[in-house]
């Protein structure tokens, strides 16, 4: 059964008409749906999937009839946000958001650090990244569409609320990842450095306001760290 994210649409109504050109093309020409076939729609805000059946197929629109509503319990019971230094390639961001959406991250924040290499994210590239998140949410069964923010001017002195964790290659004064008690926090923020790691200035600031975690003697890539640690925290 196809599962499709549909924003700005009242899915509580008995009949829905799909008119988006790209979506209609995907359903009719790529997926080759047929009349009476069932598809599942979700709006990325409410934790419900709505089952519809196709009752009419036209060249430019598809008419659907509502069948039932099912609660989607795929979301984790706390917020998990990733604050990742901008990597040196767009492909790394694509990998992070795709896999991060699949495992359950609520939000992705990419920001420039002292040692970040120059990477320009145009409006078209941002649209592509948002589409990757949407497709990953559809595929993985997510009820909520994670947010993505990209900033050149993130103030590391003004960290977000709740539990902040940053990862470092040195074991001095570091905690173990297993020591994080996620049950006492409503929100956990993970901070991952760039390919060149955090500068001394950034480490000094982060150590004052976050929990410093050392992941062992092997150094993970910037596109690996958030995915591995996020999955561990969710599953533990």
Image: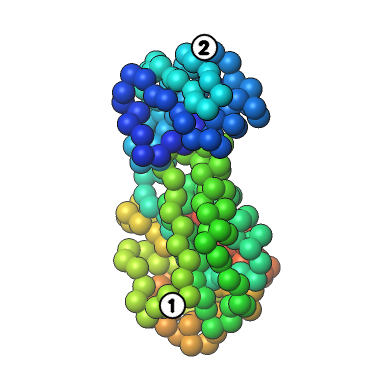
Residue farthest along the front direction in this orientation: 59
- Quarter residue 115 falls in: bottom right
Give the secondary structure at mark 2. loop
Residue 144: horizontal and vertical position, in percent? Answer: 41, 42
Which residue lies under the disc numbered 1? Answer: 153
Residue 129: horizontal and vertical position, in percent? Answer: 55, 54
214 or 56: which is nearer to us? Answer: 56
41 or 172: which is nearer to us? Answer: 41
Q: Which residue is drawn at 63% across and 63% down?
A: 90
Image mark for residue 92: none
Q: Which residue is drawn at 57% across and 53% down?
A: 128
- Quarter residue 196 falls in: bottom right
Q: Count neighbours of disc 1 (C-alpha within 10 A) and say few if under 14, some if 14 to 19, many if 20 or more.
A: few
Q: Which residue is drawn at 36% across and 34% down?
A: 9
Horizontal arrangement in the rendering, residue 37 relative to residue 51 (left or right):
right
Which residue lies under the disc numbered 2? Answer: 36
């Amino acid at each position: 059964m196809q599962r499709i994210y549909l924003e700005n649409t009242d899915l509580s109504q008995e009949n829905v008409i799909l008119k988006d050109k790209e979506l209609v093309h995907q359903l009719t020409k790529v997926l080759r749906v047929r009349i009476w076939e069932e598809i599942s729609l979700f709006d990325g805000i409410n934790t419900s999937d709505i089952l519809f059946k196709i009752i009419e197929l036209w060249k430019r629109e598809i008419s659907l009839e509502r069948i039932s509503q099912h609660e989607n319990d795929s979301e984790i019971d706390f917020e998990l946000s990733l604050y990742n230094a901008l990597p040196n390639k767009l492909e790394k961001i694509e990998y992070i958001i795709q896999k991060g959406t699949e495992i359950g991250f609520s939000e992705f924040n990419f920001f420039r650090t002292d040692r970040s290499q120059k990477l320009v994210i145009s409006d078209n590239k941002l649209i592509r990244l948002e589409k990757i998140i949407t497709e990953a949410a559809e595929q993985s069964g997510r009820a909520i569409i994670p947010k993505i923010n990209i900033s050149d001017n993130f103030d590391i002195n003004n960290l977000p609320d709740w539990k902040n964790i940053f990862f470092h290659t040195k074991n001095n004064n570091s905690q173990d990842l297993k020591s994080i008690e996620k049950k006492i926090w409503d929100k956990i923020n993970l901070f991952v450095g760039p390919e060149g790691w955090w500068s001394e200035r950034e480490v000094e600031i982060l150590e004052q306001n976050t929990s410093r975690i050392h992941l062992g003697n092997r150094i993970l890539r910037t596109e690996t760290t958030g995915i591995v640690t996020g999955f561990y925290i969710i599953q533990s």
